[in-house]
Image (cartoon, helix red, strand yellow):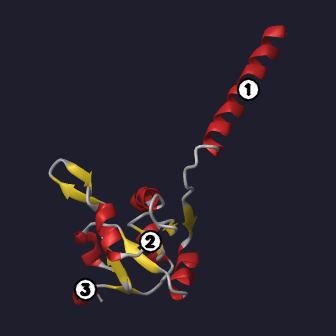
Amino acid sequence: MGTVLWNSLLSLVLLLLVLLLFCSSGADEVVTVDVHAARHLLRSGHRYLDVRTEEEFKKGHVENSLNIPYMFNTPQGRVKNQKFMEQVSAACGKEEKLVVGCQSGVRSLYATTDLTAEFKHVSNMGGGYEAWLESGFAVNKPQDEL
């Protein structure tokens, strides 16, 4: 019984150390909002940053959005846009309030994580453009798809 108690105590100590390291890392936490909250933020002055590829963006996008791809499609697969932060910094002020979205919410989570290092007011839109469409919110689409 002493071994079981010792192992339990050791596991608890390790868990506390991991939590302590995580909480004291100073890393900015990503805020994720659902599409309804994102829509409210956009109506109150936030700017929508669409991080999908240009091809995806041209098929349809949230109204009044800015498209800066976080990744590019290449013959080898998707690769990160190495100029992403530079491009966002050129288009947006550090104090600007941004809602970041992609197709499903994954790329935007990575992009939002990067952006929190330099921008103060950044939210990830969970579910992405797909969830926006499913909610029936307004989008811009090419004329042949309307």
Looking at the rendered structure, the secondary structure element under dot 3 is loop
Kind of residue at disc 2:
Lys
- Dot 2 falls on a residue whose secondary structure is loop
Q: Residue farthest to the left?
A: 75
Residue drawn at (57%, 63%) of the image: 31
Give whichever of 97, 77 is nearer the camera: 97
Helix, strand or loop at disc 1?
helix
Q: Is residue 33 left or right of residue 128?
A: right
Asked whether disc 2 touches disc 3, contact meaning CB atoms under 8 Å apart, the reply is: no
Q: Position of residue 110 (x, y in %)?
A: 42, 56
Q: Earlier in the sequence, mark 3 or mark 1?
A: 1
- The image quadrant that residue 20 belongs to is top right
Depth-wise, is mark 3 or mark 1 nearer the camera?
1
Within 10 Å of the Cα at label 1, are there few (<14), some (14-19), or many (20+) other Cα atoms?
few
Marks 2 and 1, the one that precedes in the sequence: 1
Q: Amino acid at mark 1?
A: Val
Residue topped by disc 2: 94
